[in-house]
Image (cartoon, coloured by chain):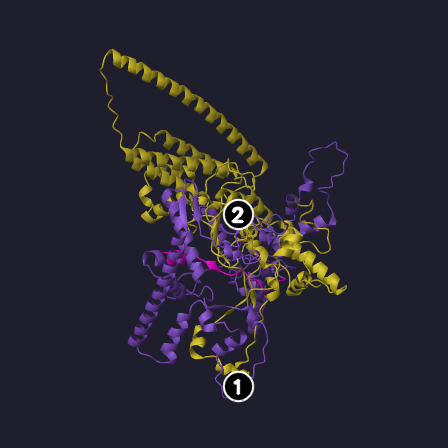
Chain colours: A yellow, B purple
Amino acid sequence: MSRKRFHGLKRIVPRIRMTWNKYNLYNLSRMTSPNNHGTYFQQKWKAKAATRGYHGEQIREKQWQRMFTSRLNAVVPMDHRYLGEHDGSELAAGRGSGLEQRLEGKRTSRTLTPYMHMTYAPTERRLDVAIFRSLFASSARQARQFVTHGHVTVNGKKMPYPGYLLNPGDMFHVEPESVLFATGQTKDREQVKAGRELKRARRVANTRRAEKRIAKREKALQAIANKKVAEELAAEPTPKTPRPVIADETEARKQRKADLQELVKQVKAILENKKAPPPAKRKQDLREINREIRGTMSVLNRKPVSEIETSIDALTARLTNLYPSNLFARIDKKKKPDSKPASDIAGKAQSSTPEYTAEEKKKMREALVLSRENPVDESKPYATPWTPRPYMSAFAFIPRYLEVNHNICSAVYLRHPVARPGLAEVPTPFSAEQMQLAFNWYLRRR
Amino acid sequence: MPPPLRSPSVLSSTPCCANQLCRTTGQSSRPFSTTPRHDQRVTRARRGLFRWLTLQGENFRNPLSGSTNYMGAYDNKLGVLKRVLEARDQRTLERAGKGEVEPEKTNGRSAEEKNIPPETQRDRVPFPHNKMFISQAVLSEELREEIWSQIMKEGQSVREVSAKLRVEMSRVGAVVRLKEIEKEWKRIGKPLARPYSRAVMSMLPQTPFDPHHIVSHESINDLPVHASTGQQIFHPTSESRQFTRQDAAKVFNKRLLPADDRIPHPELVIQHRERVTEGLSVEERKERAELRAAEAEEKRERKATREAEAEAMVQKVESGRWEFRFTPINTDDAGKDGRGRRGVGWRYGVPLYDRSRGQIKIPKIV
């Protein structure tokens, strides 16, 4: 659907697109105000071409022409105190336009309402554009793809039409996985390969498991049949007594095990980071930590839970000290890294746990939670742990006609966009003159 | 740790980034091919792009911590934040005023230069050519939580909460809807997109919540500009007449209401008038407020009964999958010539446009 050069560099007036692409950012930076050469028709044509390249570039021209309306929505913010104190007659006093002293005394610089920026307001009603504006997709075309691929619901129902015009109060929801993929950093080649291998391994394991399950089921059926036969032979069941297991403790152990595995993953991620490989000394420390984690894991089921917990805390603290920028250290940044050698701390680790106050422990737990929320998972289609894609912050804004909750990747279309004195709600990179020319192009008589 | 301040002196020391960014330097996957590599040819335009990306564009690569990071906030030539430049000039001026000498340019910048001055509205312009669009603040997490708790826990009305916290009524409703879903997800253990949400919120300007000092999020009394007020009218009246907003509305359109009744919070105007202009006592105001509330309640009930009656007229048949709704029709609605707009069904000679171009065939409402 899209042409070969979507973000062209060659044009004298490069097209600005609805994307977060770095080419787009560059084009935006070298955008110049249009020179007013040529006839009025030519100016209008150019303005129309430039603005349509951004606004609803995925919409056919005829479709847009049908959407276009010359009625532009605007509001005026009113002060309830003024309305309460005056009935409006003071504006009609004197010769019909207010008393002269009042006007002199007021001397307010009246800000104009940018009506012309509302030219493309009807496109903002479309579902795909609204998804892009809510920062759920990195381009309007990607948003469109999400819709057609069935990742979007409107008011809880699947909506496969990107041209659906949202009504005020409509709630739309995009699959969080799609949103994370669209806004997260892309994987590099090694990560892609690793992910593929992981998926293959999982597939193999799953098929094996399925085979096993089938075999087991057959076995169980056989056993039941045998049992029935046996019962018929001699009605004497032998009930088994279940082994006494304390549910809480096993839960806790499982949790601790997950924590340890998470730690191992973190250490591994740091060690294998190609972009910023750790120095040799750091590597030694990390390997030391890794070894200790393994040791703790091996005695996980033998030692009491509290002891395991203290050792986990100690390990987390050490990792935090080594890497203040690490996920674990997001909370206590002020803490100074210990300069003591690793073996020294390692010797102390088991005995010196009371050193950490309750608050520190709580912080460490929070850090653990943070890392659990944003885990390393090679099977995802985006780089993990999730980080926003580059150049996103330059395009990150949410217009007021949307109310977005990013936690659940849902948003509500509150109302149609409006212009107010000094502000227009339709995000557009173009100046008022250009928008006016484009507006005039679309008026019936040109 | 605050991020290092971006300035050209720092950036020019890392020109290698261009090579990393530009894919052209990588080895060709088809080393013996004689076809020119049109896709990744190094042209002047591409060189310009990568030069820009290593210098000025480097600012936008990662979000700025504790601030928004829009293009309008930067000086495009230097690639430095405008507010940083201004602060620097200010300091130079101050020093000159005091008669101090310019300090030597050292490698490490001074402490006062490291922390970036707070952003202003000027710095929230994502598109430098369009000053009329600024990135407006979104509700912070705390404010959303507060709105939810005031509505769902304390049971206040949307109108009250909107007036108190200075947030539009429709937004209050939307916040509560979305929060409810979020809580439901938490309850059933569905994972939230926390890292994403945290990252996005750090890039956006936010309206903070402070119970002692309410910051206005947006103007809550927006008067929509009515189409019939767009015209200029010369309306002669006597000089002695009190020509109020009501009269002006009547002149524009006979059915147009005055601004006092068309704004979302007319009760604020009434309260202010009673308190300040009329100077009523607390009891009187309370009495009047109760009267108004009773009236509104009666009106609401009447509307509800009307709707219930209309609903009762519809005969419903519930199947497992659909609810069939039968409404009585009148054949006379088609009119004498059979072309009436309210007529039902296919009528001879009346064209059906449902298959023609330009008709909207996708759902209009869900």
Q: Number of marks in the image?
A: 2
Name the chain under label 2: A
User: Nearer the N terminus, badge 2 or badge 1?
Assistant: 1
Q: Compare residues B160 and A106 and report the one nearer the observer.
A: B160
Please state if A231 lies on the left or on the right of B74 as rendered.
left
Residue at 38 percent of width and 42 percent of height: B189
Please state if A241 lies on the left or on the right of B323 as rendered.
left
Q: Compare residues B200 and A161 and report the one nearer the observer.
A: A161
- Could you classify mark 2 by the number of other residues whose Cα lies within 10 Å: few (under 14), some (14-19), or many (20 or more)? many
Residue A103 lies in the magenta-colored region: no
Q: Compare residues A63 and A107 and report the one nearer the observer.
A: A63
C-alpha separation, residue under disc 2 versus residue under disc 1: 57 Å
Start-end of magenta stretch = B129-148
Image coordinates of residue A408 in percent, x first then y, are 45, 48
Image coordinates of residue B280 in percent, x first then y, are 33, 79
Please state if A215 lies on the left or on the right of B351 as rendered.
left
- Could you classify mark 1 by the number of other residues whose Cα lies within 10 Å: few (under 14), some (14-19), or many (20 or more)? some
- Element class at badge 2: loop
Query: As shown in the figure, which amino acid type bears the numbered disc 1?
Result: Leu
**Nearer the viewer's eye, disc 2 or disc 1?**
1
Residue A151: in sight, yes or no? yes
Query: As shown in the figure, which amino acid type bears the numbered disc 2?
Result: Pro
Q: Which residue is mark 2?
A: A388
In this rendering, the answer to whether A258 lies above or below A337 is above
Residue B146 lies in the magenta-colored region: yes
Residue at 44 percent of width and 35 percent of height: A264
Q: Which residue is mark 1?
A: A99
Instruction: Tell me, yes or no, whether the two marked residues, 2 and 1, touch with CB atoms within 8 Å.
Output: no
Discs 2, 1: same chain: yes
Residue A337: in sight, yes or no? no
